[in-house]
Image (spheres, coloured by chain):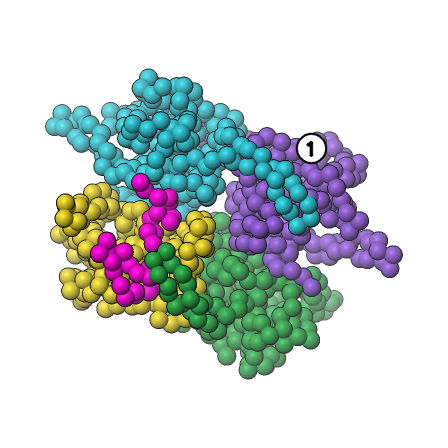
Chain colours: A yellow, B green, C purple, D cyan
Amino acid sequence: MVNNLGKGNSLLNQYISELRDVEIQKDTMRFRKNLSRIGSIFAYEISKKLEYKSREIITPLGTSEMKVLKNYPVVASIIRAGLPVHQGFLDFFDRSENAFISSYRKYYKDGNFDVHVQYVSKPSVQDKDLILVDSMLATGVSMALTYRELISDEKPRHSHLIAVVASVEGVNYIKRNLSSKNVTIWVGAIDDELTAEAYIVPGLGDAGDLAFGVKP
Amino acid sequence: MVNNLGKGNSLLNQYISELRDVEIQKDTMRFRKNLSRIGSIFAYEISKKLEYKSREIITPLGTSEMKVLKNYPVVASIIRAGLPVHQGFLDFFDRSENAFISSYRKYYKDGNFDVHVQYVSKPSVQDKDLILVDSMLATGVSMALTYRELISDEKPRHSHLIAVVASVEGVNYIKRNLSSKNVTIWVGAIDDELTAEAYIVPGLGDAGDLAFGVKP
Amino acid sequence: MVNNLGKGNSLLNQYISELRDVEIQKDTMRFRKNLSRIGSIFAYEISKKLEYKSREIITPLGTSEMKVLKNYPVVASIIRAGLPVHQGFLDFFDRSENAFISSYRKYYKDGNFDVHVQYVSKPSVQDKDLILVDSMLATGVSMALTYRELISDEKPRHSHLIAVVASVEGVNYIKRNLSSKNVTIWVGAIDDELTAEAYIVPGLGDAGDLAFGVKP
Amino acid sequence: MVNNLGKGNSLLNQYISELRDVEIQKDTMRFRKNLSRIGSIFAYEISKKLEYKSREIITPLGTSEMKVLKNYPVVASIIRAGLPVHQGFLDFFDRSENAFISSYRKYYKDGNFDVHVQYVSKPSVQDKDLILVDSMLATGVSMALTYRELISDEKPRHSHLIAVVASVEGVNYIKRNLSSKNVTIWVGAIDDELTAEAYIVPGLGDAGDLAFGVKP
């Protein structure tokens, strides 16, 4: 299933428009802040789908029956462009376990590339809700690969894959390659075009470079 | 109209349960953080009701038609307990104009009290969306009074009154005293009881004292 | 005693230069952020002057003798321009009690004005370290008046008065009117000129308007 | 040169004592917050050693000659335990370029281990100030290795290596292996003991696990 949170109007679209804007994105502090705020918004929307349990809370003046999270989800992000989004998730899911994973493109002489997982740090995800965060979903290859690496031979309760801006092609790749029964895709916008170099158009450019500086 | 965001399950209820908890609320940093996160959640939900306009955004790779806020709402808060919630609103509505207002209870020998406005700093609210933020809605007298002071002889486009925890009585007082056509009430929880001293039960105690220290 | 933290080079001067810059200050989010970061820097520098006590800390692997704050200072701010600076202080002194105070200028026909205290919310400051925060120190009248109101008939252990940008005249006014034995002034910059309307030149304009929007 | 910022009393020691405390560190949000605040404190202290240039700032009321950073340093961190400290640095050096690097220990049957670099994302550091951040400096092998990888065949203007808590052995290893002319070490505390498993005693345990959850 695909949830495009940008379909309805909200502050999310305001932030995405600032991320996209070639002038506003020069302010890297605001760029990272927008990614983090978007992360918090996704965290909140996803939290509506999680499981809750009743707990009796003792207040200074009485007792209140409240619904609290049954379990915090594991929050994972793809390094480095996923980090500011991750920060917004962790700001809201402050009791979550976290995972970090990196992948890289290995290019061949003909311009094609494979994606390989490089760094991974993860807790067990067995029977847990798993959230995997990135800023962009371009081809979808990297998201699918890191997702498979994160779960390896475990079975999460349910998985949520998040990208702020996705391409039609990337969303379709995920839908084709990962079971829709166990996986929900959440995006803030779906753009039509994907260049041969795997850039989303109109997109916003390279989110990692914009957040943290250009890699030579 | 009354929007009780605590009716559905989400992180909001997790945070309110921590605010209420007589043990967890001893950590004043977490207490303020929870009020701020709740402010951001309210800001996001209210943003779904605001007006948007189309704007063409130039990205590094193309042009994107985005919906952005037509106007930022004015964010007002009741000092001091409203301040941490205000901070969460301002974190999300970062381009908003702000207002601050204070009121106090003047007690009579028989234990009754009047509420008076003391400090007010405000921009014009004419034809703007106005958000008035407090942590608690107890009797509703203070909220109604400060709201009237804020608008004085102006006419906002629409007003949103926010309280994290409200009493049934407080909500009813606002509904009776302010036109429901122009005003929407947003709360995180509605508690049944209100003591003679105007404390919400079970509530969470005195939000101002818990956030900033006990006033003698 | 006067501590001008802007005398030596540090990030403080970077932030003050951004606050002053008529272009950069249009970004109100960055303006407030700079005031908050400056608040945190002042908090840290002031913390070097506070009293500490030894405490044995049990770590997961042993015991460590650490120096911790003997007491947290009370952090007070002048509403509204002091609020973003207060936030930076509270972010660092997260266990502090807080006070808020407001004053206003009552103008006479001849253009002269008196300063009156309006709103005050404060804990006892007897025998405590007291920090009073504002963004600007123009004439010094408002700072001296609110300071006297805060302490009233109590006696703090020591008081620290903070302004991001001060005028020579304002600093001198405080030095003349408050005992230098019990009070330390901390500023980020001292500007030469003060206009008849009590604006600091070159200064940065009206900090309250720049942070929160223009008051009509 | 070694700068031990924990030698003098300040909020830094308050935060380190909370990081060490086996009870307080259970609150992972506070644990990460303390690492970030410490990062900001280090950033501020290091900023006193950087180069500044004069710039004329146009204020709304005049012109001010200010000293601003000549260049922002590159901020690098060792994943994952360095991330929350990195965040505090970036919060203060908001215009910096960033680098991320990971290393892992490859264990042999006899219990010995080599350290290898795994992931690296970096801008050019030629002629720039370089700050490399980690939470702990245990043996020093990982810090020295990642530092060499970061600079590879380039020559930074000056390098600052940061660890919140270090061991005597780790500090000595860095001093022996990296030129003290080009490298300054900054720590918040230096503990005496290092276990055979390379844990600092009394230390604070595994900073990565405490910030982000236990790795199986």
Question: Nearest the camera: D37 or C107?
Answer: C107
Please say whether residue A202 is one of the residues in the magenta stretch: yes
Question: Nearest the camera: D126 or C67?
Answer: D126
Question: Nearest the camera: A52 or D37?
Answer: D37
Q: Position of residue D169 (x, y in %)?
A: 33, 21
Which residue is label 1 attached to?
C2
Q: Which quadrant of the rendered structure holds the C terminus of chain D?
A: top left
Mark 1 crowd level (few <14, some 14–19, many ≥20, 10 Å Cα): some
The secondary structure type at the circle numbered 1 is strand
Please say whether residue D174 is one of the residues in the magenta stretch: no
| Magenta highlight range | A188-216
Q: Which quadrant of the rendered structure holds the N terminus of chain D?
A: top left
Q: Residue A78, can we see it?
A: yes
Residue furthest to the right in view is: C110
Residue at the image position 43 percent from the left and 40 percent from the top: D96
Q: Quick check: A196 left or right of C62?
A: left
Residue at the image position 84 percent from the left and 53 percent from the top: C112
Vertical placement of C9 versus C201: above or below? above
Residue at the image position 64 percent from the left and 65 percent from the top: B123
